[in-house]
Image (cartoon, rainbow, N blue to C red):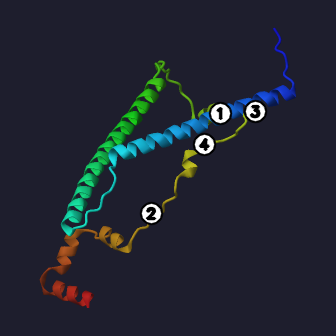
Amino acid sequence: MSEKKLSSSRKHHLKSLMLSIAKGLLETETKEKEEERKRYMTDTCPPLSLPGGLQALQELCREFHHKIDVIDEERYDLESKVSKSSKEIEDLKIKVQDLKGKFKKPALRKVRMSADQMLQALLGSKHKVSLDLRANLKQVKKEVKEEDKELRDVGDWRKNVEDKAGMDGRKKMFESEA
């Protein structure tokens, strides 16, 4: 069954009717909210009567401070409940993600493949990439210190001991240092 097309004037008339009904609903909703607010304020906040004496004003201030403390405690309790529930929601979201992501892993076969073949399989035949791992390594030159050479070239220790034996050896040792 084909639907009949509405004329533009009919569409405009229906649209204006819908807008007028929505406007009326919004106005009644705002009036109800205002009345609810006034009702709440009259219930929770009695009319203020300022006493004339200093003692009475201090008592009124103490009363207000007590009410403020009670409201702050309620606010803190509500904030803690909200934070706790938001943490629970986050945890549940994470659990849902984990459950959605879990699947049975197939048994994998061992495949011998070089790095170049693996890159070609991953990137496709369009990309020509050769992977030479040794080319990426850093070249390190080993420097040999002179002190290390002297320690290695000690030679025969017996000969060294015989040279330093006696007074001549000690004299040579002091002359060589000076």
Q: Secondary structure at mark 4?
A: loop
* Identity of the residue drawn at 19% across and 70% down: 158
Contact check, label 1 and label 4, Cβ < 8 Å: no
Helix, strand or loop at label 3? It is helix
Tell me the CA gap for discs 1 and 4: 68 Å
Residue drawn at point x = 48 percent, y = 60 percent:
140
Q: Is residue 51 left or right of residue 130?
A: left
- Pick whichever, 174 or 120, lies toward us: 120
Mark-to-mark CA distance, 1 and 2: 85 Å
Q: Tell me which amino acid carries mark 4.
A: Leu
The alpha-carbon separation of the residues under discs 3 and 1 comes to 10 Å
Residue kind at label 1, given as amino acid type: Ala
Q: Earlier in the sequence, mark 3 or mark 1?
A: 3
- Between the C-alphas of marks 3 and 2, the distance is 89 Å
Residue at 24%, 90% in the rendered image: 175
Judging by the rendered image, the residue that carries numbered circle 2 is 142
**Disc number for residue 131:** 4
Residue that mark 3 sits on = 16
Q: Mark 3 belongs to which amino acid?
A: Ser
**Nearest to N terminus: mark 2 or mark 4:** 4
Residue for badge 1:
22
Q: Counting other residues with Cα less than 10 Å from the Cα at mark 2, is it few (<14), some (14-19), or many (20 or more)?
A: few
Q: CA distance from mark 2 to mark 4?
A: 27 Å
- State left or right for residue 155 relative to residue 82: left
